[in-house]
Amino acid sequence: MLDRFYILDPWFAYGLSAVIVLAAAEFGRWIGVIWRRHHPEDVSPDILTLEGATLGLLALMIGFSFSIALNRFDARQSGVADEANAIGTSALYARMLPEPHASEVKGLLHDYVQLRVDLFRAPPSPISLEQMIRRSNQLQAELARHAIEVSAIDPHSISAGLFMHALNEMFDLQEKRIAAARNRVPGLVFMLLYGIAVVAIGFSGYASALGSRRGRIPVAIMAVLVSGVIAMVGDIDGSQTGFINVSQQAMHDLAQSMDR
């Protein structure tokens, strides 16, 4: 369903990011040592300028990617609250329906909420998400059937009209949440981000070996920080598979209130 679904273990993702950037720093330092050994008097001063330029470009790309991921994270977070409110409104209007529709609709809405709660108790997968959408569509069809039957009995029923309006909003919000789940930071952006990070940190390692007073430790610290920030952008963009997750508390509260 999703074009890209983040299923990597978060520790593995952060560790892999650190290994990639640290390897670039060590490779750059190794090249610098070889160059220094064979050309002890030929050290180009332009390397520091090039290092500063690539680090500046890296900072720009990290800020750009972080902004994209954070905006999408906020959209998913607000989508949970909006859908929970819409389902709660539908449940409220369902009480005004005649029996047996009111009781049956209440049970369907309870299943509708529980489906979302169960999905996010464990890290979701494309298969579980597809199953949730399929089951949600079935429940939506049942809910719409009840609204149509009540309207057919009394075309001027205010309660049926309010309930149908609430259902339409609830159905629309599901599609918005699915669209928000699909709306990820493009993979090409991450590839470019890692490419620039490798080049920038590689130049830092290279410069540290050409006579700079910096040793391995400052460059390694910078590499770890850069890799951590890049991995955090991916973590935020994943939303449900890492350390930084979209809170489902609104759905949990709604499920508890419907149980009561």
Image: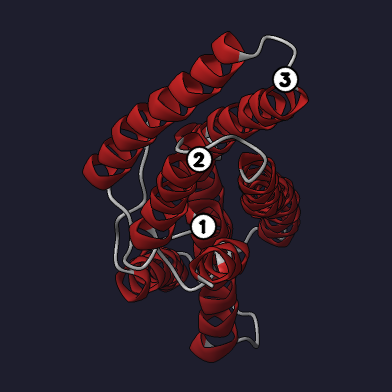
Toward the viewer: 151 or 34? 151
- Picture quadrant where residue 232 is located: bottom right
Q: CA distance from mark 3 to mark 2?
A: 37 Å
Judge from the rendering whether residue 196 lies leftward or rightward of residue 128; answer left or right.
right
Q: Secondary structure at mark 2?
A: helix
Q: In terms of sequence position, does the residue under pointer 3 or pointer 2 come before the other?
A: 3
- Discs 3/2, front: 3
Whether pointer 1 and pointer 2 mark residues with C-beta atoms closer than 8 Å, the reply is yes
Judge from the rendering whether residue 169 lies leftward or rightward of residue 186; answer left or right.
right
Whether pointer 3 and pointer 1 mark residues with C-beta atoms closer than 8 Å, the reply is no
- Give the quarter of the figure containing the N terminus: top left
Q: Residue at x 38, y 35 (%)?
A: 136
Residue 239's label in the rendered image is 1
Judge from the rendering whether residue 233 lies leftward or rightward of residue 131; answer left or right.
right
- Picture quadrant where residue 153 is located: top right
Q: CA distance from mark 3 to mark 1?
A: 42 Å
x%, y% of residue 123? 33, 62
- Discs 3/1, front: 3
Q: Secondary structure at mark 3?
A: loop
Residue 106's label in the rendered image is none
Colour mode of the rendering: secondary structure
x%, y% of residue 148? 53, 15
x%, y% of residue 246? 57, 62
Q: In terms of sequence position, does the residue under pointer 3 or pointer 1 come before the other?
A: 3
Residue 181's label in the rendered image is 2
- Residue position for label 3: 157
The amino acid at mark 2 is Ala
The amino acid at mark 1 is Ser
Q: Is residue 179 visible?
A: yes
Q: Residue at x 36, y 68 (%)?
A: 121
